[in-house]
Image: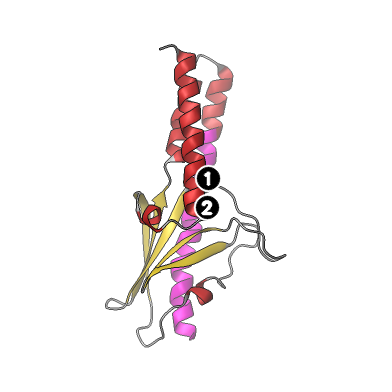
Amino acid sequence: MIAEDVFTILFAVTCFVAISETLLITYWNRFYFELGIPIFKYSAKYDPNTIKIKEERLNKIEDNKSLAKIDFRKYSENVFMFRESYSQKSKNTRGGYTLLVRGMLYIDDEDCQITVYGILNTYPILFLIFSAFYAFSDSIYGISFFIFVLGFEVLVYFIQLKRYKSIARRVALIQKEN
């Protein structure tokens, strides 16, 4: 198999996985949300003398206005899935984008703790492999492309890490406010 064939196959697989994952995330596929590699975990304590969190209240959490809004969906009694918004239903909703990480939020009533897990999507890894393969094709453009992709993915990861940590802290504060 020649390099162009491998490149074409990697490109096709990467595109297929990216589209598939985006659809699974957009349509809140329950099985897919908990499946994957957790790449970070953050916990925050909350006041035990409070009421239970509802999905409607989570979806009112305000975040950085320049980034996509965070959407929540109930998974089970004390577990919620979340991701950046893909919709633009109103003037206040910022448009979404394809993300590197999706999240799960767990509320542990026994330990009075809220835990957020960031679960890595597969396509960023495949896109990094694809760009690395392109970089090693003896092209200065390939190396530049790989460095750009790597830098972009690292930047988005740290933005999402900060946002997801903020979610756990904000949910803990919501519980104290009620």
Residue 164 position in % (x across, y down): 47, 60
Q: Nearer the viewer, residue 57 or 178?
A: 57
Q: Quadrant of the N terminus?
A: top left
Residue 9 position in % (x across, y down): 46, 24
Label ID, residue 155: 1
Name the amino acid type tagged 2: Ile
Where, by quadrant of the figure, is residue 105 drawn?
bottom left
Image point 60% across, 54% down: which residue?
A: 96
CB atoms at circles 2 and 1 under 8 Å apart?
yes
Label ID, residue 15: none
- Dot 1 lies on which element? helix
In magenta segment, residue 176: yes
Q: Is residue 76 above or below residue 18?
A: below
Image point 61% across, 62% down: which residue?
A: 64
Image point 49% across, 72% down: which residue?
A: 170
Q: Which residues are magenta?
A: 149-178
Label ID, residue 159: 2
Q: Is residue 7 above or below residue 79?
A: above
Q: Main secondary structure of the magenta part?
A: helix
Name the amino acid type tagged 1: Leu
Residue 37 position in % (x across, y down): 34, 48
